[in-house]
Image (cartoon, coloured by chain):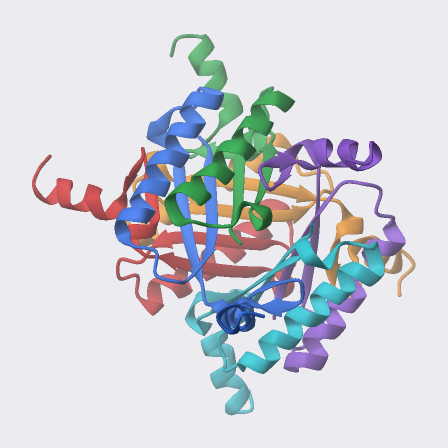
Chain colours: A red, B cyan, C purple, D blue, E orange, F green
Amino acid sequence: MPYINIKITKEGATAEQKAELIRRATRMMVEVLGKDPATTVVVIEEIDTDNWGVAGETITVRRKQQKRGV
Amino acid sequence: MPYINIKITKEGATAEQKAELIRRATRMMVEVLGKDPATTVVVIEEIDTDNWGVAGETITVRRKQQKRGV
Amino acid sequence: MPYINIKITKEGATAEQKAELIRRATRMMVEVLGKDPATTVVVIEEIDTDNWGVAGETITVRRKQQKRGV
Amino acid sequence: MPYINIKITKEGATAEQKAELIRRATRMMVEVLGKDPATTVVVIEEIDTDNWGVAGETITVRRKQQKRGV
Amino acid sequence: MPYINIKITKEGATAEQKAELIRRATRMMVEVLGKDPATTVVVIEEIDTDNWGVAGETITVRRKQQKRGV
Amino acid sequence: MPYINIKITKEGATAEQKAELIRRATRMMVEVLGKDPATTVVVIEEIDTDNWGVAGETITVRRKQQKRGV
């Protein structure tokens, strides 16, 4: 009956990649803890880069710095 | 002071249905636990069917199987 | 397939009250949105009153003020 | 390594305001608890006013009442 | 920079099993989406069986039924 | 009406430190976004170091390495 919530920045993850995350996260719960896959729920949330911060900066700002080679 | 977070797939819930969820969830906290409705917060999140998995499959895939009678 | 997360302060909710929340929250999803109860998940989290704040104050402090009639 | 999730109604917060929330939330974890900013994550979620309820009513309804002076 | 929250019932997962969930969830984000493991955060929450419901019943009740062969 | 959820590792944050987080997080919502403090909710969750992972390792393991000077 596990519930897994994956939050990532919205930067173009494809439907196939998200389906793969769901498959693997479910299999992980079965293999590591013997959980029933039928009631394993995975919810992926994609967050705008303006709304995600690390080290006090938005990802929007960090991506610009990476492009400029900062 | 309860906080209730309801996650559902984004499949056309109307504003009226969401208002009804908020009314009933709030009343539930008052009637079952005697909570103060004034500080009861309900947040509904609607998740794309590509981003929700059960039993290792996305809801997008499950809906297609249901339509095909699988 | 809904997922409902209820956060309340840890102030003595009984097992029966929590079972009642689970029953009612599940029925609500069925009656309002036609969801399948079999895959409706409800998770209740009980939070220490030191760890919950409203209006900038902990619930621990607010409960003491209520007792003193503040 | 703290994780801070801020949920607000979607009512026009600017990119600069969100960047300021991220800066201040991160600084708060450093100053109050001595946490490492490099691994402090802040995620802001903006929720439609139809999907947020207080006191059993949606924010959409409450905003209309405020405008009408109710 | 992903954030993964895993909620399971508190039924004796060992420290080693939880470490394995953290390893695999992190590797999954690297392999499927090319994320940086250094900023991938995994948080596991273990929930009392009285506080988790599926199909309108607590896991406490469901476990008793399973033992009785219901 | 904001809702702020702060997750930290359970490593001895005092009641006073948690009250300070609640005060500052609430003031931040007022000062940055003009929110009403009366309906600003802050919930702090303290997570066992075995249950928190960064870079694929539990915080329990990372703390031991830090002590050994690794």
Q: Is residue D13 visible?
A: yes
Q: In the depicted view, which residue is nearer to us: A36 or D49?
A: D49
B18 lies above or below E3: below
F45 and F1: which is toward the camera: F1
- Name the residue at the top extreme: F68
The answer to whether residue D40 is visible is no
Give the left or right position of residue F1, taking residue D22 as reference.
right
Q: Quadrant of residue E53?
A: bottom right
Which quarter of the image is occupied by the N terminus of chain C? bottom right
Coordinates of residue B43 in the picture (x, y in percent)? 57, 61
Going 60% across and 30% down the picture, which residue do you hit? F48
Q: Which residue in the rendered view is the most extreme toward the front?
A: D69
Residue nearest the observer in this picture, D70 or B57: D70
Residue F25 percent across, percent down from the top left: 49, 37
Is residue C70 left or right of F1 when viewed as pictured?
A: right
Q: Position of residue B6 (x, y in %)?
A: 60, 64
Compared across the picture, whether A46 is left or right of B28 comes to left
Residue E66 percent coordinates (x, y): 84, 59
> In the figure, is residue E10 to the left or right of E33?
right
Q: Residue furthest bottom?
A: B68
Q: Is residue A32 above or below residue D31?
A: below
| Residue at x-position 46% and y-position 48% | D6
Residue at position x 53%, y 23% in the image: F60
Number of dots carrying numbers:
0
Name the residue rendered at 78%, 68% in the picture: C24
Observer-nearest of C23 and D11: D11
Quadrant placement of the C terminus of chain C? top right
For residue F66, which quarter of the picture? top left
The residue furthest right is E68
